[in-house]
Amino acid sequence: MRKLRSLIPTMPLPAWVSTRAQTCARSATLAVALCCAGTALVHAQSGAPSANSADAAAAAAAAASANARPVASNAELLVRGEYLARAGDCIACHTVPSQKMFGGGRPMETPFGTLYTPNISSDKQYGIGAWSADAFYRMLHEGKSRDGTLLYPAMPFASYTKVTRADSDAIYAYLQSTPPVHQPNRPHTLRFPYNQRKLLLGWRALFFRAGEFKPDPKQSVEWNRGAYLVEGLGHCTMCHTEINALGGNTASKEFQGGLIPLQNWYAPSLTSNKEAGLGDWSIDDIVDLLHAGVSNRGAVYGPMAEVVYDSFQYLTEDDVRAVAVYLKSLPGHSSEVDTSPKSPFVTEEANRLAPLGKKIYDAQCAECHAAEGQGKLPNFPPLANNQSIQMNSAVNPIRMVLNGGYAPGTKKNPMPYGMPPFAQLLSDEEVAAVVTYIRTAWGNHGAPVSEKEVNALRSAPLF
Amino acid sequence: MRNRIVRVVLCAIALALPCAAPFAAPPAERAPDTMQARVMGCAACHGAHGEGTDNDYFPRLAGKPAGYLYNQLVAFRDGGRSYPPMNYLLAYLPDAYLKQIAEFFAHEHPPYPPPATPKVDAAMLALGKSLVTNGDASRKVPACAACHGASLTGMQPAIPGLVGLHADYISAQLGAFRYGTRRAASPDCMHDIASRLDERDITAIAAWLAAQPAPANPTPAAPSSLPLACGSVPH
């Protein structure tokens, strides 16, 4: 299905999820909820989605006054909860496309077996209808289900732990207001020993620290709002930080990019490294990319298309801008790019493939991406000076040539343009040649790719 | 905005200079604001105008009723039809846009390919013709033409034409309906019908349909009552 995405790790579990779900992964969850439902929890803090809500002082004040405030309006609370659930992208993992919302059951393939996301609708038997707000918060904050069961880290509780109590309560109230889906949860089919949840204790000791987001008073309100969204509900680190052998995100490499296991897409660096990350991007370009799905620097595709489709397009532009401001502040690292001199073999390989690559480029690609790789902005993305094309990992450009792709249809870009797949038209050698060409032409500094790499990605999961 | 200001300043400077060079670079070219340009993602397999290609499994889309095409796009997006390359491409496209894509191809009328030379014998062709035009009442198999139009160009608003398709494609679809790997809204009439056909029937039907010449008038037939209930066709 459309998303089969994610995988999750299990035990020594990787925390990632795969599949398009990555996105999903983000959302995942088990959720639960609670009681009081809609009642009174209001909080003011982020009151709405405003960019400034996460400011430290505001947060503290909000937290303090949250339960004291009269229920301003239940409707307002639900709207806020729905907005926050979008920011957390709960729907991507907890809803099977075209089926009932939040009914769960979406498979997440992992190297250890398949996880099935749980029902988080308001159904009292199978969903979280019988949960309390306290239980829901504990689930988000501590990664434990209502009965204390440890959650698999495909549910991004390591990020959601940063969500404030007020926001947790709003999401809880919103989920409780959704129609109950009377559908039993499907048991996970993890292999031994990964089906032993005790192993999760080890993963948690290594990779999990509970704790709400603490605003940095030295930074702006906007920066803090962005940090809160990126590190908390957005759970961006799940994909954009390398997954290590134990299935956790390597803290020292946070946001420097990583291959999404099984899914075989590379989530690029979000740091300010100019060659690999966003160092060369303007705030406006980042906002366009996340809010519309296309920008003058590139378009989202693969798993990130799902994130924009299910989550970012629903956020306010102020919030998306706050995310961009925060991302732009992430320091880059020279180690993100391989700057070692190219070996004679690599140069020779590039020279060998480039002529064929140029011939294919001129015949198949130049109509949209233009003769010099400058694209026709924003709908036909530029290939020259595009990090996504020239970064160390060639997985994404190879897959785009093989599989094509449509940018997501969003409020700002409801009729996206699309690139055709070429898997059926070009041989492994031809794909290697054209990808090598676009990675090395026009000043791009990528390395050539081999037929073998291309061939291996022909069987990468599409859905 | 900042760029614009910079540009204005630069232009001002340029104007102030003697022999100013031409204004900065010409405005960058933009993608054509047309559906034709937007569906280029479909063209590699289905042709720029939906005429299909030589590949047996990439069908003609042109001229099929928009309601049919829309139903298929939604089914690929949501999983009712499983073909990963299509499922992937459509995953994040909203209903309104899928309708526009369907309308675009429904209104395209490129020439039909020449009819295929049948690879089956005359008896098979005769069986195919008989099933397509008359059906088999003893097995409760209605004639294809009863729903797909007397000239097999489909019926508005949601039944596809059967001419201009490759035999292998038709036979694969009938098999998929029979085994439930291609599903339509309930009641799934094509599942019911395909389940009453055997392999020989399917081969015969596919071979005869693929050998038919282009219809004189490619317009789908007007809506009329169907011999059985089909969930995909609004009543």
Image (cartoon, coloured by chain):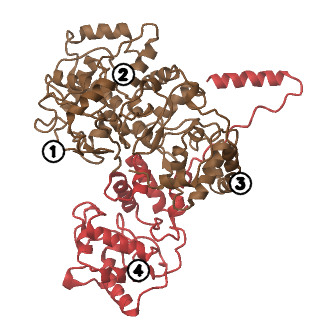
Chain colours: A brown, B red
The residue depicted at 41 percent of the width and 45 percent of the height is A263
Residue located farthest toward the bottom when viewing the structure as drawn:
B122
**As shown in the figure, which amino acid type bears the numbered disc 3?**
Pro
Residue B65 rendering spot, x and y as whole percentages: 40, 64
Task: Report the residue marked by disc 2.
Answer: A49
Q: Which subunit holds the residue at mark 1?
A: A
Give how far apart the Cα atoms at labels 4 and 2 are. Answer: 58 Å
Task: Report the residue marked by disc 3.
Answer: A355
- Badge 3 local density, few (<14 within 10 Å), some, or many (20+)? some
The residue depicted at 53 percent of the width and 20 percent of the height is A331
Name the foreground residue: A406 vs A268. Answer: A268
Q: Which subunit holds the residue at mark 2?
A: A
Task: Report the residue marked by disc 4.
Answer: B209
In the rendered image of this protein, does residue A323 appear above or below residue A196?
A: above
Left or right of A342 on screen, residue B89:
left
**SS at mark 3 in the image:** helix
**As shown in the figure, which amino acid type bears the numbered disc 1?**
Gln
> Can you tell which of label 1 and label 2 is closer to the viewer?
1
**As shown in the figure, which amino acid type bears the numbered disc 4?**
Leu
Task: Report the residue marked by disc 1.
Answer: A183
